[in-house]
Image (cartoon, coloured by chain):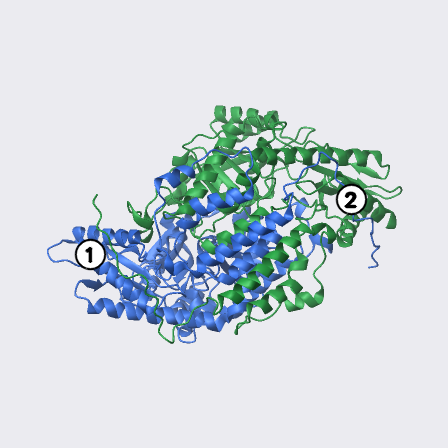
Chain colours: A blue, B green
Amino acid sequence: MNKPTVTVGTDNSLRTPEEITLDPSDWQTFRKLAHQALDEAIGFVENVRERPVWQAVPQEVRDQLSGSLPIEGTPIDEVYREFKETIMPYATGNIHPRFFGWVHGSGLPGNIVAELLGAAMNCNCGGRDHGAIYVEREIISWSKELFGFPTESGGLLVSGTSMANLIAIGVARNSVDKNIRVAGLGALQKGLTAYASAEIHESALKALEILGLGSSCLRKVGLNSDFSIDIAALRQRIAEDRAAGYQPFCVIGCAGTVNSGAIDDLDQMASLCAKEKIWFHVDGAFGALCMMSKRLRSRLKGIELADSLAFDFHKWAHVQYDAGCVLVRSGDLYRETYTSRPDYLHQIGRGLGAGGDWPCDFGPELSRSFRALKVWFAFKEHGADRIGELIDQNCAQAEYLAGRIKAEPLLELLTPVTLNIVCFRFIKDGLNDAALDRLNEDIVADVQESGVAAPSTTRIRGRLAIRANITNHRTHRSDLDTFVDAVLLAGQLR
Amino acid sequence: MNKPTVTVGTDNSLRTPEEITLDPSDWQTFRKLAHQALDEAIGFVENVRERPVWQAVPQEVRDQLSGSLPIEGTPIDEVYREFKETIMPYATGNIHPRFFGWVHGSGLPGNIVAELLGAAMNCNCGGRDHGAIYVEREIISWSKELFGFPTESGGLLVSGTSMANLIAIGVARNSVDKNIRVAGLGALQKGLTAYASAEIHESALKALEILGLGSSCLRKVGLNSDFSIDIAALRQRIAEDRAAGYQPFCVIGCAGTVNSGAIDDLDQMASLCAKEKIWFHVDGAFGALCMMSKRLRSRLKGIELADSLAFDFHKWAHVQYDAGCVLVRSGDLYRETYTSRPDYLHQIGRGLGAGGDWPCDFGPELSRSFRALKVWFAFKEHGADRIGELIDQNCAQAEYLAGRIKAEPLLELLTPVTLNIVCFRFIKDGLNDAALDRLNEDIVADVQESGVAAPSTTRIRGRLAIRANITNHRTHRSDLDTFVDAVLLAGQLR
């Protein structure tokens, strides 16, 4: 089509005297402050070893962070000063080499650059036709490649695996009956049931609750000794449910459980689901990225057969928070669940309103930040191989830590170390289980409060465990020695 | 309690020769690159008027953004150069003073600083006890204050109003029957029904679909001439549904519709809901922030009575994407819907695992970025009054634009201008409605492609409209003149 060209005077920046803006009145002063902040931000990461892993927010700071809505503005250099006093010293701690709590990535200095650039562009990645959308498509394409998903599958960047689980299980639910989207679940004759190992992450339950299926629809299946799902028990439970009139619709495989890093036999689960015609979803929050490790990827065999997959870039790829991803094998079923285009989002063939699939077609969010940019910077700068090597390093460090624990008479290893998570406890003669639970909870808090290291807690077969997760590219073996020393000291001081 | 103190040698940073990291090998070189990027990022915003509002991503750039997963790394200065060539020039456009598409905020230079600092801290705001959690609580507290919500209400920062609607309507659904969370919707005897004006945002429908209620449960109620909901028709529809055996559970009020910025009579809706014992949710995506305008806040009367409220900081408060918020009056009902604490998230009295309510107790997300920081910087630097004055300025500019349109014989205003949105079209003798629709769609694409301005399209009473939304702190009246000139020229060239 021959397009007419619109050109009018565009250098028109006349401002009526009363017109105001939120831009700085003096860009040079602003620029100076921004460079100072950048310098200190980089120093904050570079010198992280000089600080405690974590420190509690003091009461006077909590009070300062309980103020009223600001009515008047404050010069940004004063705002920055307040930030440095009341916020910056009290970070979560996960950028520190001795942060071993929960499963937290440690972040990338290069992502400071990505985030400041993203903030300048300030894209809204819900849809429309602009560069950020192509970057997100590229990340989704890389993800398909990494996990062996077909080109026609769909994907989306989300805050994390919890959101990804919700979105994917939503597609699984709607794939049961095309009427669900319009008519709701009331139209279903049979109760839908879902299956996962007893070690399944809580977010799957939450997803089922939000989707209106209720947490009771999830059948938690027993475990093998390595904490992976017992496939025979899974098969049997599905058969029992069918016999009782339920409609099994989704099996969730775990690629890296939170408690011990166990990986289910995804290949066998995929076969079972194919035979039973049940949706196979994989929760691969951190374990899925083992696909980048030449040593570990074979343990994920079968992941390429999943109907959907959830995982996080902010964990073992160390992308800044937050950056998760969902992939759904059938792009069509995916669109049928979430695509809807009201008049004001109507696509046109060209201009800003063009561009094929929009991210809002693949999930509940319409306003979306440009989180693809930090993933793009992370993989461009470091490459999948290097990230995979660091995964291997963390797993080797976990083995080293387990070795240290086994060698200490006062420490007891509570789970086999199969990946990067080490669960153990301090033991003391004459204490019953309840007292040992309290002691170990105290030890964890003591060690956290000391600033030396930050493990977390969980329960393994009912017993409170000190849980060390090593998803950290800054950790050295010597940090693990320091951590063990701190736990021993805390236990002995109690 | 008397706490023992753990102190061990923490200066231990010995690295075994083979241990690697993703940190820069040379921080000085990295620092230099980061400062260069910051300089250019600030310039990108400062000089935005010198560039087209938007430009299409050329095919060769699309090709470059379709590469394979990077296996090897690349020095970050080369990654940055690639970014500058293939990504930076193709932003959404909403930071430009002549971006009038959809409802997009234009961003704040100060948020570049907030984002780079947030990237350095790299907090995970799902929970635990650290500074970022207190900052988010402060933002929620400011929000309660702004909207007259009680202290005991709960709130959460989310990506935007779409997510906020989903979360709030989820609480409304579960408040009907405490068994829903566990037993799912199958246990309900009566069909639940929801109500909103015909101008309701699509995200409410999507929320109902995801929640398993089905889009058919939403009753779209007719409008007054100002595009606000017809309260008498709402009352009647509720009565009819009750008579037919349905269970009305939620009424959604609009505070600023997408098509025309109409604000429902929230006060009357609140009274009706109180009388009928129906949950009253307000979708205030951009309109709710009129609360900061001394001139406009009276039009939101009744918003303080809502059971839940969804709105965006990234729209009329210009916080960088994404930053939305949900408030729920009853903190208890809110927790009953979403709180769940598996073993590994078990709270302890002190240390990192302490801290009362965690954000993950209020929604589906567990991994969450530190988006509170940019909201904090925005309100600290500018204050609510200034942001409110800019809202007034945008509304006055919309009136000015409407005046210009009324004065042009070739342009026709399609909706009353009640806030900041102006819907109009170019008219040409001898063209029927279908032809005028095509013409106006072409005009919008022509103007976008010219780079002069970026309006969007919608349909008003079935007719395609050029839609100009002014949620932009950089727009001057002269920009609106330029925009009108561009539309007239494009129409005449066709």
Name the residue type under label 1.
Answer: Gly
Residue B18, placed above or below residue A325 = below
Name the residue type under label 2.
Answer: Phe
Any part of residue B445 in sight = yes
Query: Residue B124, image x and y in percent?
Result: 43, 52
Q: Nearer the viewer, residue B463 or A95?
A: A95
What's the chain of the residue with tag 1? A
SS at circle 2: helix
Q: Nearer the viewer, residue B113 or A214?
A: B113
Query: Residue B322, image x and y in percent?
Result: 55, 48
**Which mark is drawn over residue A330?**
none
**Which mark is drawn over residue A491?**
1
SS at circle 1: helix
All told, the count of numbered labels is 2
Q: Nearer the viewer, mark 1 or mark 2?
A: 1
Task: Check disc 2 and report the residue beneath it.
Answer: B483
Estimate how packed mark 1 is, as few (under 14), some (14 to 19) or many (20 or more) residues with alpha carbons within 10 Å: many
Residue B289, placed above or below residue B494 = above
Estimate how packed mark 2 is, as few (under 14), some (14 to 19) or many (20 or more) residues with alpha carbons within 10 Å: many
What's the chain of the residue with tag 2? B
